[in-house]
Image (cartoon, rainbow, N blue to C red):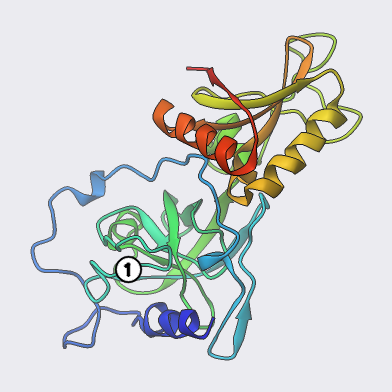
Amino acid sequence: MLLAALALLAGCASRPTVPGVGIDRDGPLPNPPPDLAKVPDAQPRLESIRSGGPNKPYEVLGERYEPITGDEPYVDKGLASWYGRKFHGRPTASGEVYNMYAMTAAHATLPIPSYARVRNPANGREVIVRINDRGPFHKGRIIDLSYTAALKLDLLRGTAPVEVRRITYAEIRAGNWRKPGSEPAPVFVPETSPGAPQRETTGSPVAAAAAGYWLQFGAFARLDGAEALRQRVAEADLTLLPLLTIVREAGLHRLRAGPFPSVEEARATSARLRDEGGLESSLVDKR
């Protein structure tokens, strides 16, 4: 924990706000790639969140931070800063290499990895970034953007007010993250009249399945059976928790994990769960 805190202090906490000159100052690299304003936003997808590592509680500069690890909505307003050449090519808190030309950002408490919509109220511009780093740790600042994200928002001159809204798993599954300013709106499939969304009256909501490769762990007539199996699978592998969902299909409650980006990743996960946890699953292709 001490080493993690020191690493955070050496990184995000020391980032200057305004680019300048000198070896210890941050700023842009010479000759940046052309057409950075056309770089696509980060594409939200369901990614496993480790319970430890960069998502552990930590302390920096006397302040304690509790990273979010569940599918909780998050909205905040404050100052945004950006970081560039001083950290370009160095490891982020997630272990990934920082690329100042990618659509990423650092946040003190949002899950790593997760996605957020950042809006500049001064000009109405919005971007979607992938959170893969920790910071900033200056009072009033709520997000540290990559060079390209700041460029697209017209924030390269220094800190400026922004609005940050997390894109939750429910929004990603439903696909409504594409609608700026929309609230999470999970789609529910009823037991009686198909096509009329509603909420289950017993237990948790039952979500509609998104397209892709899924692993199915079981199918139950009653929702509580699927809920019990979801708890067992989550206890066997906490990294799967964000991917687990219960789908109402053909009159049964089906516990699935996904969608996975490729059939190979889905099969590898199935084999690992079988070998390490004794959990059997079948592949479901919903493309």
Q: Nearer the viewer, residue 83 or 232?
A: 232
What's the residue at 46%, 75% (across, down)?
136
Q: Nearer the viewer, residue 98 or 240?
A: 240
In this view, the residue farthest toward the right is: 202
In this view, the residue farthest toward the bottom is: 62
What's the residue at 52%, 66% (across, down)?
53
Q: Position of residue 268 (x, y in %)?
A: 45, 35
The answer to whether residue 260 is visible is: yes
Q: Position of residue 95 (x, y in %)?
A: 38, 64
What's the residue at 44%, 79% (across, down)?
8
Amino acid type of the residue tagged 1 in the rendering: Pro
Q: Provide the residue designation for mark 1.
A: 91
Q: Nearer the viewer, residue 264 or 154?
A: 264
In the rendered image, the quadrant that contains the N terminus is bottom right
What's the residue at 46%, 73% (across, down)?
135
Q: Position of residue 96 (x, y in %)?
A: 35, 60
